[in-house]
Structures are given as structure tokens and as C-alpha cells.
Image (tube, rainbow, N blue to C red):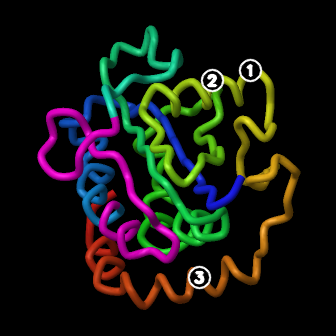
């Protein structure tokens, strides 16, 4: 697939409503996470949320089947596009986003489904929320494949399994760190 882009979708359920004190730390960090992504090497764009000012939503927001019976009608999720898997990994597990991940157990219920899914799209395709939810369910039902995969068992744009270039991830993470130092200082002062 020439000029392929990496699509990323994640989904979780909070331990309490978004406006509750129990998940306040998550909500306070969300703008810094979005800004850190925008500054990250290899970030190509993200969907906004329907009815929320700012970035345009990539379609009607839907959720995977795991929301059923939760008592929630909405849940934390994101949908974005990246240049490659190393760029996404450098952002996800370092810096501002890593700060949020270390506190995720305080804000989210323990998942029995995959927390995220990756897949390749053509340079002209922009995934929508339905595609992200469907790919996550597919990964859960069938395991990693070129259609829907994770960081533990990644695939390349050609459909073949790949090995992540860990040295490149470190280099990208170092570059990102200089771009988000002010954001790191901000989140370090926020409550969990």
C-alpha cells in the first residue's frame, strides 16, 4: 500500500461519569494529551468529537459493544492517523501521554477487551468512528492480523508482520520531549 498511514483507535470505560471527581485527573490531562499529540513527530491528525468545539469529528461517534450494560452512553476513546508505528509508539509510551497511562487504573475499569487497535489505510482514506470500533471488535474476536493489530504483534502496510524499530522509537521520543516540555511541567502539577 503506497503512502499508507497508520490508523489508531482506543476505547475504555471510566470508573465514574466524566464530570465526577473520580476521573477529574483524566479530564484535566486531556487537553495536554491532545496538544502533545499535535506536536509529536509523525502525527497526521485526529478526530474531534461531535458537538464539541474545535477539531472536526470524523463521522458520528459510535462505540464498540463493550459499552453495552456499562450504564454509560459515551466513553473515553480516540481516533487518529500517524505516519508509522514508531511515531505512534514514541508518543503513546513517553512524555505527557505516558503520565496519563501510569494513572489509567485510577480512572478506568479493568478491560476484558483490547484497549487499542491499529490498522493501515491508504493516503486518501480517513477512518471514521464506526471503522475504529469495528476494528477493535475484530481484533478481540480474531486476534492480531493485518486487518487489526496491536503493538505486541504489528503488521506493515504490505500485510506482513514487522518488528518495531525500538531505536527509532527512542529517537522520536527524545525529539518529542523537547517539543512538550512545557506540557510535561503542567501535567506534573495536576491531581490524579
Q: Secondary structure at mark 3?
A: helix
User: Which residue shows up at 40% across the image and 66% down it?
Assistant: 37
What's the residue at 65%, 44% (across, down)?
119
Q: Residue furthest top?
A: 69
Q: Residue 188's image quarter? A: bottom left
Q: Are marks 3 and 2 in contact (CB under 8 Å)?
A: no
Give the CA distance from mark 1 to mark 2: 6 Å
Asked if residue 6 is positioned above or below residue 41 in the image, the reply reads: above
> In whole angstroms, how far apart are the C-alphas of marks 1 and 3?
33 Å
**Other residues around mark 1 within 10 Å, as few (<14) / some (14–19) / many (≥20):** few
Q: Which residue is mark 2?
A: 137
Q: What is the x, y in percent for residue 95?
A: 47, 75
Spatial CA span between label 3 and label 2 = 30 Å
Q: Which residue is mark 3?
A: 172
Quarter of the image for the C terminus: give it.
Answer: bottom left
Q: Which residues are magenta?
A: 34-58
Question: Relative to 188, is 135 on the left or the right?
Answer: right
Residue at horizontal 25%, vertical 48%? Answer: 24
Question: Are circles 1 and 2 on residues that touch, CB within 8 Å?
Answer: yes
Q: How many C-alpha atoms fall within 10 Å of the one at disc 2: few (<14), some, or many (≥20)?
A: many
Find disc 1 in the rendering and name its residue. 141
Amino acid at each position: 500500500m503506497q503512502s499508507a498511514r497508520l490508523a489508531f483507535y482506543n476505547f475504555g470505560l471510566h470508573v465514574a461519569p466524566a464530570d465526577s471527581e473520580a476521573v477529574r485527573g483524566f479530564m484535566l490531562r486531556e487537553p495536554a494529551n491532545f496538544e502533545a499529540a499535535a506536536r509529536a513527530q509523525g502525527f497526521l491528525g485526529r478526530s474531534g468529537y461531535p458537538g464539541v468545539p474545535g477539531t472536526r469529528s470524523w463521522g458520528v461517534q459510535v462505540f464498540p459493544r463493550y459499552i453495552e450494560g456499562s450504564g454509560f452512553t459515551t466513553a473515553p476513546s480516540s481516533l487518529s492517523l500517524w505516519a508509522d508505528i514508531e511515531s505512534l509508539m514514541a508518543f503513546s509510551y513517553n512524555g505527557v501521554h505516558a503520565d496519563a497511562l501510569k494513572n489509567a487504573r485510577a480512572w478506568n475499569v479493568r478491560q476484558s477487551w483490547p484497549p487499542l487497535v491499529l490498522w493501515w489505510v491508504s493516503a486518501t482514506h480517513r477512518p471514521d468512528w464506526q471503522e475504529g470500533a469495528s476494528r477493535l471488535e475484530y481484533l478481540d474476536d480474531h486476534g492480531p492480523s493485518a486487518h487489526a493489530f496491536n503493538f505486541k504483534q504489528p503488521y506493515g502496510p504490505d500485510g506482513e508482520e514487522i518488528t518495531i524499530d525500538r531505536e527509532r522509537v527512542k529517537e522520536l521520543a527524545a525529539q518529542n520531549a523537547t517539543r512538550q516540555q512545557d506540557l510535561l511541567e503542567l501535567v506534573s502539577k495536576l491531581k490524579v
